[in-house]
Amino acid sequence: MTTYHIKLKDDVLKVGFGATLATGDRIVRDVAAKLDEMIATGELPGGGLIKINGRVSVLVSQVLADKLGKLYDAIALLDPKIGNPGIDRYVVTISRYPQYQVGDILDVVRESHQTNLKVVLCGFANTGKTCFRDGLKQALLQIPDAPESYFISGCPDGDGSWYSETAKRDPDLATELKARYKAGFSAEFAKLKAQEVRSINTPIFVFDIGGRISDENRLIMKEATHAVILVKDESEIAPWERLCDELRLEVVAIVFSNFFGNNDVVESETPILRGRVHRLQRGEDVSQRPIIQALARLLVGLSGG
C-alpha cells in the first residue's frame, strides 16, 4: 500500500500519509522514490516557487527539502494553525529568490466551495476519546480522495496525536513522554487552545477536549462547528447535548463506549449517527471499527468530499 501521497496541482504539491501504518524509514524511502519518478517524467519541472500542502513529518520534510531545493528557487509550507476562513497561509522555508525571504507568509485564497468542519469530540472522562480520535484519524486516511484532515488534542494531558502511534511500538516510551509533557488545565492554556482551533481551517478538523464541563472546555468548544458525544451510559448524554446547544454546535454522532464489549454496533445513521464502540484500548488500531468507519464516511460527506 502507498505510505505517502504526492501530487502536483499548479504550483501546489499536495502531500499526505497513506492508509498504512509504516515506520519512518519505509516512508522516507517511498517519498524519495516517488519524487525521483516525478522528476524523471517531468511532472516536477522546477521553477521559482513551489508550495507544499498537507501533513509532513520531520523525516519527510528533510527529503522534500533535499529533492525540491535543487529544482525550485523557493519552497513554502502550509501552516494550518495560522490560517483564516477562506485563506491558506504558507510560510517560506527555503529561498534563493529575491522576491521571497525565509519566514515570509504567503496568503492563498482557498477554493470557494471548500467546507471547513471543526468537530469536537466531547464526553466525560474515561470514555476513550483519545483512542477514538486516533482511530478516526486513520479511518479518514483510508478513504480514497478524502478531503484533507487535521487532528489535535485539546487537553493538557500529554495525549497528542503522536501518543497512540508511539504506544504501538514502545508503550514504556509513550508513558514516559506523556508524563513529561503533562500540564495543568489553566485559563491561559484554554485561551491559547481556542485560538489554535479558531485558526485551523482544513476541510476536516477534529479535536478532543477534557472530560468535564468547565469554563475552559466551553471556551475551546465554542470555536467548533460540530460535535461528537462519547458516553458510557444514557445519563451522560443530556449534559453534553445542553452544552452543544448552548454553543450552537450541531451534534452529528452519539457513541456509547463499552470497554468490556465484544463488538461495535451502528444503530442508526439518521438524523444523527448513533451506535456503540467496544474496547478503546490505547495503543490498539481501532480504525476498522464499524462505528468509527461510519463516522469517517459521515465527515467526508459533510465536507463535500
Image: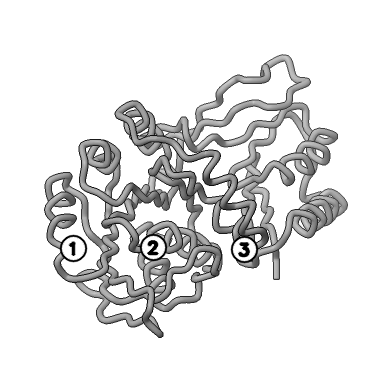
What separation in Å lies between label 3 and label 2 (alpha carbons)? 16 Å
> Which quadrant would residue 214 be assigned to in this image?
top left
- Above or below, 201 against 6 in this view is above
286 vs 124, left or right, is right
Mark nearer the N terminus (1 vs 2) = 2
Circle 2 residue: 128
Q: Residue at x 38, y 29 (%)?
A: 192
Q: Are marks 1 and 2 in contact (CB under 8 Å)?
A: no
* Real-space Cα separation, disc 1 to disc 2, in angstroms: 14 Å
- The residue located at (26%, 62%) in the rendering is 252
SS of the residue at dot 2? loop
Q: Is residue 269 left or right of residue 87?
A: left
Name the amino acid type tagged 1: Glu
* Label 3 element class: helix
> Can you give x and y, in whole percent of width and height, for residue 201 in the image?
42, 41
Residue 109 point in image, percent of width and height:
46, 34
Compare residues 137 and 113 and report the one nearer the observer.
137
Name the residue beneath numbered marker 3. 168
Q: Mark 3 near mark 2, Cβ–Cβ under 8 Å?
A: no
The residue furthest right is 40
Q: Among all residues in the image, which is located at the extreme bottom?
A: 262
In front here: 217 or 299? 217
Real-space CA distance between mark 3 and mark 1, rounded to the nearest whole angstrom: 30 Å
Q: Residue at x 43, y 59 (%)?
A: 133
Graded by Cα atoms within 10 Å as few (under 14), some (14 to 19) or many (20 or more), the crowding at tag 2 reads: many
Look at mark 1 in the image and give the residue it sits on.
236
Q: Secondary structure at mark 1?
A: helix
In terms of sequence position, does the residue under pointer 3 or pointer 2 come before the other? Answer: 2
**Residue 273 vs residue 71, the one in the foreground:** 273
